[in-house]
Amino acid sequence: MDAMTRWSSPREEVEVGEVAARRRRSLIDVDQLTPAEMRWVFDMARSFEEVSRRAVKKVPALRGKTVVNLFFEPSTRTRISFELAAKRLSADVINFAAASSSVAKGEALKDTVLTLQAMGVDALVVRHPCSGAPGLIDGWTDAAVINAGDGMHAHPTQALLDCYTLMRRLGDLEGRRIAVVGDIMHSRVARSCIKAFTALGAEVVLVAPPTLMPAGAPAGIRVSYVLEEVLEDCDVFYLLRLQMERQEEGLIPSLREYAAAYQMDLRRLERTRPHALVMHPGPINRGVEISAEVADHPRTVLLEQVTSGLAVRMAVLFMALGGKEEENAAAG
Amino acid sequence: MSPGERVIMDARDVERAIRRMAHEIVERNRGAEGLAVVGIRTRGVPLARRIAGLIGELEDQEVPLGILDITLYRDDIFDRPQPEVRETDIPFDVTGRSLVIVDDVLYTGRSVRAAVDAIMDFGRPRRIQLAVLVDRGHRELPIRPDFVGKNVPTSRSERVKVRLRETDGCDDQVVITEGGG
């Protein structure tokens, strides 16, 4: 890819003023961002990718800012990715895991947040099992709140990093067809991804067994219950992790039966278009939604997604904390 | 030329200044061995490209060119609205090299401080020199240029604007305007 081509128009022509003028530049879900703003994030992410290739993988941009990773749910890759992103921007990072904190003593979410606010933190990266928790927190604090996944609601940085990964591979998403396959009903990743993909002009097809398909798909989104139906006409297959509990809940007959109908395996991959890519937000269940061969296949961009995640999260943190602070507080 | 503008260098002046600086850089460094030129975004980049090209012709050897975006190193990063970060591209190892940083206008010296800090994160150059098309004075940091296209005494209320054919789509030109314009 030509290093100098831009996805966004030059700064002056984009309405990024909107981002700058927001009271707190929190990111709760992707639909807060216009497509122009998303492209602007991607261009910035590409600049940040270069930082990770330097001898000294650190820039002083957020020196003196404090970022708290507030995680009420287990997470490895998202937390490490945010932590590394903040550290590469020279912010101070505090990792807060609910299990080993006063939350275990029964402290209410609001009090945890107010306590952190009283310590003068600048950004809260929040992962919470309840949908809407980051939005609530955003109302309680002056710090910027970045949603790192809440319940079944949203996971905006995952959606942004997926779009960025795809644009690096395929160029603009306008007119591309993306199949989102698997447990769509319970997936915050799917919800944010569908919004981001369609905002950038891609066509989305949802593929799942009827028990894992949410009722009432958004207008203009195709729904299919059979993976074979869409194999030949999609550019991207976005596989979702099947949570093992779904079997106990009776939503699928068995993992084997799910795999037989919805697993991306070599046989199915060979029927797709030669340029089609396979994505997965991780962690994967080898042998359930993706076969081991496909997981290691050159058309599977799993690890690129992880690498992109770092750059995109640097861009998101920089957007939340860079620039003039009074301006953030003034408007809105 | 817009009203209120005073042209202090036209295209031929700019051309001559760049040629002279290229010669001076070669003279001071006794050739182009181990030399690389790094332009500061935005208008330092085309200037650096021209200087690298001229040195390459004079010495008959390729001079590596780097592009530096200093946004993340600025000391006023929290005083400006949402800054835009653009790509930095240093396609060579800086360690042991003599680098010439190129910018269009030298004013407070803060951009140069940021550029030097940025370069140090890429390695340990043997030396760093500074070439600017216009030095307008009013330094706020202990920084001085090694190669100057033109010294222009200015008042703080004036603005010095460099226009280049690569970035501004017009003939090269350096103008001074009074006040906020």
Image: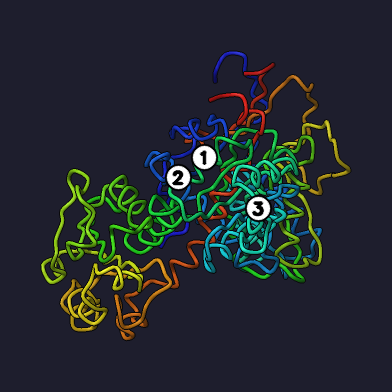
Q: Which residue is mark 3?
A: A68
Relative horizontal placement of residue A256, taking residue A317 as reference (left or right)? left
Disc 1 marks which residue? A136
Q: Residue at x 79, y 21 (%)?
A: B155
Of residues B120 and A207, the one nearer the viewer is A207
Residue furthest right in the image: B142
Dividing the picture into quarters, in which one does residue A14 lie?
top left
Q: Is residue A135 above or below residue A104?
A: above
Q: Is residue B18 above or below residue A310?
A: above
Q: Tags 2 and 1 in contact by the CB under 8 Å rule?
A: yes
Image-based side of A231 in relation to B47, left or right: left
Residue type at the position of mark 1: Leu
Q: Quadrant of the C terminus of chain B?
A: top right
Residue marked by disc 2: A132
Front residue of A215/A199: it is A215
Q: Quadrant of residue A225?
A: bottom left
Q: Say if residue B65 shows up in the picture.
A: no
One can see residue B80 in this view: yes
Task: Name the amino acid, label 3.
Answer: Val
Question: Between marks 2 and 1, how big is the CA–CA gap?
Answer: 6 Å
Give the residue type that dot 2 points to: Gly
Chain designation of label 1: A
Residue B145 is situated, as x and y percent measured from the top left of the image, at: 81, 45
The residue lying at 28 percent from left, 64 percent from top is: A183
Residue beneath the point at 18% across and 43% down: A219
- In the image, taking residue A287 as reference, residue A307 lies left or right, namely right
Proximity of marks 3 and 2: CB atoms separated by less than 8 Å = no
Going from N to C along the chain, the mark reached first, 3 or 1, is 3
Locate the N terminus of chain B by quadrant. Answer: top right
In the rendered image, the residue lying farthest to the left is A229
Q: Which residue is situated farthest in the top direction here?
A: B3
Is there CB contact under 8 Å for labels 3 and 1?
A: no
